Image: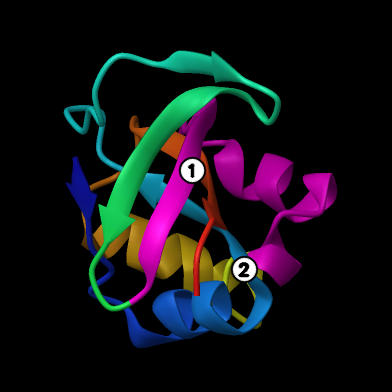
Amino acid sequence: MKMSFAVACVKEHLIKHGLVYTVRGKTIDYGPPIDTVKGRGCFVEVMGVGRCFVQKVSPTTIDHPVILEHSGYVPYSGFKTIEEWWAKIEAFHAVGGYLWKVERMSQ
């Protein structure tokens, strides 16, 4: 499966830190999950990054900005504030989708 990032700061964070949390619409599916030493998830090829492991973390809802802010995900999102991140989530119509953890497996 393949994954791409349209928002530069998110992709740059993944490249620089090897980890990013991203929100995707509810129709996104990266294939059947498998169990690995990293947990349950899928391997994907991220354009411009390489092979990554993705895991579904939680659904997003209208009250999710508070949850994201207080759960510590914002510093790993590529955004500086929850307001910036949530504005992008809304712009991409991803409210009601899922929070995903993406880890780079190769450089």
What residue type is disc 2 on?
A: Gly
Quarter of the figure with residue 75: bottom right
What colour scheme governs how the chains and residues are painted in the rendered image of this protein? rainbow
* Left or right relative to 74: residue 65: left
Please state the horizontal and vertical placement of residue 13, each as a whole percent of the image.
Answer: 56, 79
Kindly state the secondary structure of the residue where label 2 is placed.
loop
Residue placed at 28% from the left, 78% from the top? 48
Q: Nearer the viewer, residue 34 or 9?
A: 34
Q: Nearer the viewer, residue 88 or 100?
A: 100
Residue placed at 41% from the left, 48% from the top? 23
What residue type is disc 1 on?
A: Phe
1 or 2: tag closer to the N-terminus:
2
Quarter of the figure with residue 24: top left
Q: Give the answer, above or below, for where 55 lies relative to 102.
A: above
For mark 2, what is the residue?
18
| Region rendered in magenta | 49-76
Kindly state the secondary structure of the residue where label 1 is placed.
strand
Please state the horizontal and vertical placement of residue 101, each as a whole percent of the image.
Answer: 56, 45
Q: Is residue 84 magenta?
A: no
* Left or right relative to 97: residue 27: left
Question: Looking at the image, how many numbered discs can be counted on the residues?
Answer: 2
Quarter of the figure with residue 30: top left
* Left or right relative to 5: residue 1: left
Q: Using the image, tell me which numbered label, if any, was put on residue 95.
A: none
Please state the horizontal and vertical placement of residue 41, each as a whole percent of the image.
Answer: 48, 25
Residue placed at 48% from the left, 43% from the top? 53
For mark 1, what is the residue?
53
* Quadrant including the N terminus: top left
